[in-house]
Structures are given as C-alpha cells and as structure tokens.
Image (cartoon, rainbow, N blue to C red):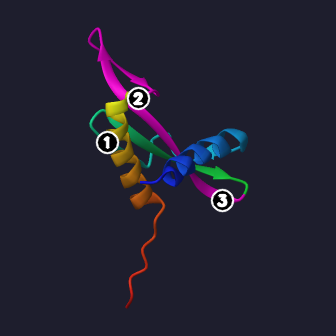
C-alpha cells in the first residue's frame, strides 16, 4: 500500500470530524483485524447522503483489562497496513467485472 491509502483513511477521519453527521447504526458496519491492529468502519448520514468513516486502533491487555490505543510500534505498522489494505479493498475499491 502506498502513502495514498493511509492518507485517504486519515482524510476520511478529518472530514468526519469537520462535517455534521448522524450515525446510521450504533455498531460498525465492518471491522478488519490483523494481529492486534484493526480498522473499524462506521457509516454515517450527512446532508449529501451516507458516507463511511474509518477508525484505526490496536487492542492490548493491561492488568487483565482490554484497552485500545491509537499509536503503533514499528513492527505493529505492518499489521496495521494489512488491515488498512483489506478495509480499502473491501470498502472503497469497486472492481468492474466484464459481462
């Protein structure tokens, strides 16, 4: 994945925080996991119709309690990249099939 994919996800998060929206569901429409990294996909309804927001995080356990964080070590970035690639492939890339 190029930096464009990461930039796209970051831009989606920035646009979502600046645009008024109403969540369509209380639950995400998809979650992509690789290792402890995950990409959570939310669908929202805005003035121009529905749109998706992508949240990146990692899960970890501390003192027997599961928590999430938004920073990644160098080795965790590979898992995050794989999760982002899958989220982009499933949610953003539409493949045209010839009939």
Query: Which residues make up the magenta segment?
Result: 48-72
Q: Earlier in the sequence, mark 3 or mark 2?
A: 3
Mark 3 to mark 1 CA distance (whole Å)? 28 Å
Q: Which mark is residue 33?
A: 1
Q: Residues within 10 Å of mark 3 (few under 14, many from 20)?
A: few
On-image quarter of the N terminus: bottom left
Is 56 drawn above or below residue 44 in the view shown?
above
Q: Locate residue 23, reporting x and y percent.
A: 59, 44
Give the quarter of the image for residue 57.
Answer: top left
Q: Residues within 10 Å of mark 1 (few under 14, many from 20)?
A: many
Q: Is residue 62 left or right of residue 29?
A: left
Q: Locate residue 60, reporting x and y percent.
A: 32, 22
Q: What residue is shown at x 33% (from left), y 41% (from top)?
A: 78
Q: Earlier in the sequence, mark 3 or mark 1?
A: 1
| Residue 60, magenta (yes or no) | yes
Q: Nearer the viewer, mark 3 or mark 2?
A: 2
Q: Which residue is mark 2?
A: 72
On-image quarter of the C terminus: bottom left
């Amino acid at each position: 994945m190029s930096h464009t994919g990461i930039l796209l996800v970051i831009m989606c998060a920035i646009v979502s925080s600046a645009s008024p929206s109403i969540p369509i569901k209380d639950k995400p429409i998809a979650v992509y996991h690789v290792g402890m990294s995950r990409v959570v996909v939310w669908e929202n309804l805005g003035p121009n119709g529905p749109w998706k927001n992508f949240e990146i995080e990692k899960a970890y356990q501390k003192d027997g309690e599961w928590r999430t964080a938004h920073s990644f070590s160098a080795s965790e970035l590979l898992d995050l990249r794989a999760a982002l690639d899958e989220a982009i492939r499933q949610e953003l890339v539409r493949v045209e099939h010839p009939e």
